[in-house]
């Protein structure tokens, strides 16, 4: 036997004596399903809302609660439904449209704290806050452009006729303007700009405000608003920062019409304001002389005047200036007509 044959025979015998290879490991078992998670939801009472949402609630009580009739509330829910509706989730059902709108209307109508709103409607505080902002955004998007707009020529003419009848003869007036202040919490930035000195002095506590400049028609419907300027600004400054000021000076108010405003505004081609009390110092001085005359002659004060207090905490703004000779002439003509009647 040659060497190659012997070697092959030896290798064959060795291979026959080796153990077989181990079998492959079994596949891993399938993963077990995750344990069932329990979600805890705090139960809140919605008894108040359920009662006020019931058709059995008297109309007068519904109106007292939401400052509007049930029919108007239903209309509001209908036009906002597509914008405020939400889908159900696996964890909970969506809050209905009527409840969402009611939370917002109640909060705006009463100013009640979110904590109390939460208890009233059976919802979380953060949920109520979110709902108020979402419904406000929906109202602005869906309703503001159509319901808060400057009157077209036909509506302006009708407003002028109504104002003339109400005022006793002031012609061409389509709106009355006023600037009011809305109290706010002091902002973190530039708080001094929002500091309202008049409110602070009157209320004896620090007051911060933002302004609302509004124009209304004879029915009290807003036709123009300018919102959000700091409370330290005077009425004249708020006006000058408004789009109304630009439109008025540009002749874009839709005709030879007037807006009337208080003494804190300037007299403009399109804005009528009261006369400045130029003779007031004379009248006050004469009152002082008459007071001294009565005191020197030992006149007795009548019982009806005992304890009489002068309410002077409300500061009356002086007229800030005449910027239009044409408006001054028109104001004189209106005043003459009101006092003496229209010219024959």
Image: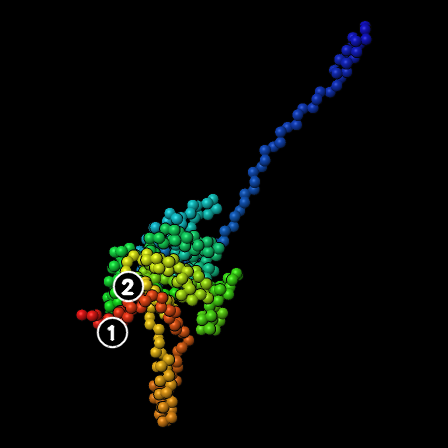
Q: Gap between marks 1 and 2, in whole Å?
A: 18 Å
Q: Position of residue 29 (x, y in %)?
A: 61, 32
* Front position in the image: 56 or 338: 338
The front one of 172 and 195 is: 172
Which residue is pictured at 71% across the width and 20% down the height? 20
Report whether 145 appears left or right of 128.
left
Asked if residue 263 shows in the view, the reply is yes
Which residue is situated farthest in the front direction here? 325
* Side of 115 relative to 63 (left or right): right
Label 2 SS = strand
Residue situated in front as seen by the camera: 188 or 293: 293
| Image location of residue 230, percent across then percent down | 46, 63
Query: Residue 339: which numbered mark, if any?
Result: 1
Mark 1: few, some, or many residues within 10 Å (few <14, many ≥20)?
Answer: few
Residue drawn 46% across the image and 59% down it: 114
Q: Earlier in the sequence, mark 1 or mark 2?
A: 2
Residue position marked by numbered label 2 in the rendering: 173
Q: Secondary structure at mark 1?
A: helix
Q: Is residue 161 above or below residue 37?
A: below
Please state which of residues 7 and 136 is positioned toward the viewer in this rendering. 136
């Amino acid at each position: 036997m040659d060497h190659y044959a012997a070697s092959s025979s030896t290798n064959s015998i060795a291979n026959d004596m080796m153990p077989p290879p181990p079998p492959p490991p079994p596949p891993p078992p399938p993963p077990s399903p995750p344990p069932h998670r329990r979600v805890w939801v705090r139960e809140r009472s919605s008894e108040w809302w359920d009662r006020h949402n019931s058709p059995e609630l008297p109309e007068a009580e519904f109106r007292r609660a939401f400052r509007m009739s049930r029919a108007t509330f239903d209309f509001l829910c209908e036009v906002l439904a597509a914008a405020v509706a939400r889908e159900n989730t696996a964890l909970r059902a969506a809050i209905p449209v009527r409840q969402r709108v009611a939370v917002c209307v109640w909060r705006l109508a009463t100013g009640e704290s979110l904590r109390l709103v939460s208890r009233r409607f059976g919802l979380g505080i953060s949920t109520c806050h979110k709902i108020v902002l979402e419904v406000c955004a929906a109202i602005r998007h869906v309703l503001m452009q159509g319901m808060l707009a400057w009157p077209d020529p036909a509506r302006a003419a009708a407003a002028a006729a109504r104002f003339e009848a109400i005022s006793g003869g002031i012609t061409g007036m389509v709106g009355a303007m006023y600037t009011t202040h809305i109290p706010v919490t002091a902002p973190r930035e530039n708080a001094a700009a929002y500091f309202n000195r008049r409110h602070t002095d009157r209320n004896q506590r620090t007051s911060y405000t933002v302004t609302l400049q509004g124009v209304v028609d004879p029915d009290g419907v807003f036709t123009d608003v300018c919102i959000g300027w700091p409370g330290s600004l005077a009425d004249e400054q708020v006006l000058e920062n408004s789009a109304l000021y630009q439109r008025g000076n540009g002749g874009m108010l839709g005709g030879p019409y007037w807006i009337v405003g208080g003494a804190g505004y300037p007299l403009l081609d399109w804005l009528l304001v009261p006369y400045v009390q130029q003779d007031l110092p004379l009248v006050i001085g004469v009152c002082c002389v008459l007071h001294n005359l009565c005191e020197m002659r030992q006149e007795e004060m009548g019982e009806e005047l005992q304890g009489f207090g002068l309410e002077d905490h409300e500061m009356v703004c002086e007229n800030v200036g005449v910027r239009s000779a044409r408006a001054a002439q028109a104001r004189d003509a209106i005043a003459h007509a009101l006092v003496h009647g229209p010219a024959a």
